[in-house]
Image: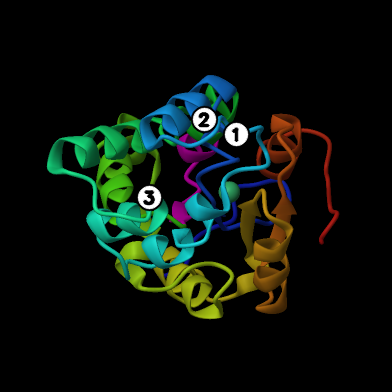
Amino acid sequence: MTHTSVSPNGVDALLLDYNGVLGLQPSTGMWTRLADLAEWPRPTPPLLPRSLLGPRNAYDAGELSDLAYWAKVLGHHPGARWLRTLLAADTAMWTRTDPRVLDILYCARAVGLPLVLLSNAPAHLSDVLDATDWRRDLMSDALYSARLGRCKPDSAAYEHALATTGVADPGRVLFVDDREDNCRAAAELGLRTLHYAGHPTDLEQQLLPGPANSTRS
Ligand SMILES: [Mg+2]
């Protein structure tokens, strides 16, 4: 399958990270609530509890169930009700979107640019994101690490996603992520990259008609 380039910079498809690009980072209040639920000392973001982050990659990769993940985080198995509460609080932290970014993506989609989500996310969050309006309206496909069994920056995650775009030349696919290591891995495969720093105009300049921005990174 081939696509006619519709962006001003010759981008034929877009691969998008979720959190930190479409998705807003959790608020301090959200971290505090999770800390209270998990009975931790209150965290000072971005210095998050090591116990929370340590097993997260395995959780994102689909190697741990919700129960197994939270048992590792807490150091013991939570009861069913506590697990449901933790899961709901954790999921709520990752489901708020940036309307400025969504507006740009709706414009890009309207002119025919294929958009594919490539997110490191556990299975439950993947299901929640898949049920959103923006996922249905914007994304031609969505790949989640828990389903792939691979997390970015594993090259296999990008290769799966690139195949999904239907664009053969990775140099005509723009990968957008707020993590530099993820962008570096994408660039090593020949993808264009935008290391997103929270400025929607950076994305807009890459995708929509306007002053040309031919910078490649
Ligand atoms: Mg991110």
Seen in the image, is 53 located left or right of residue 83?
A: right
Quarter of the figure with the N terminus:
bottom left
Mark 2 nearby-residue class (10 Å; few <14, some 14–19, many ≥20)? many
Q: Secondary structure at mark 2?
A: helix
From the viewer's perspective, is residue 104 above or below residue 76? above
User: Residue 109 in magenta?
Assistant: yes
Whether residues under marks 2 and 1 lie with C-beta atoms below 8 angstroms apart, the answer is yes
Q: Residues within 10 Å of mark 3 (few under 14, many from 20)?
A: some
Residue 194 marker: none
- Work out whether residue 199 or residue 26 is closer to the camera in this orientation and state it: 26
In the rendering, at what x and y percent does residue 48 appear?
60, 43
The C terminus - image quarter: bottom right
**In the image: residue 105, left or right of residue 206:** left
Q: CA distance from mark 2 to mark 3?
A: 15 Å
Q: Amino acid at mark 1?
A: Pro
Disc number placed over residue 74 in the picture, else none? 3
Q: Amino acid at mark 2?
A: Trp
Amino acid carrying label 3: it is: Leu
Q: Is residue 213 left or right of residue 100?
A: right
Q: What residue do we see at 65% from left, 69% from top?
A: 186
**Disc 2 designates what residue?**
31
Whether the residue carrying mark 3 lies under 8 Å from ligand 1 is answered with no
Residue farthest left in this picture: 80
Q: Is mark 1 within 8 Å of ligand 1?
A: no
Q: Is residue 102 above or below residue 130?
A: above
Q: Which residue is mark 1?
A: 43
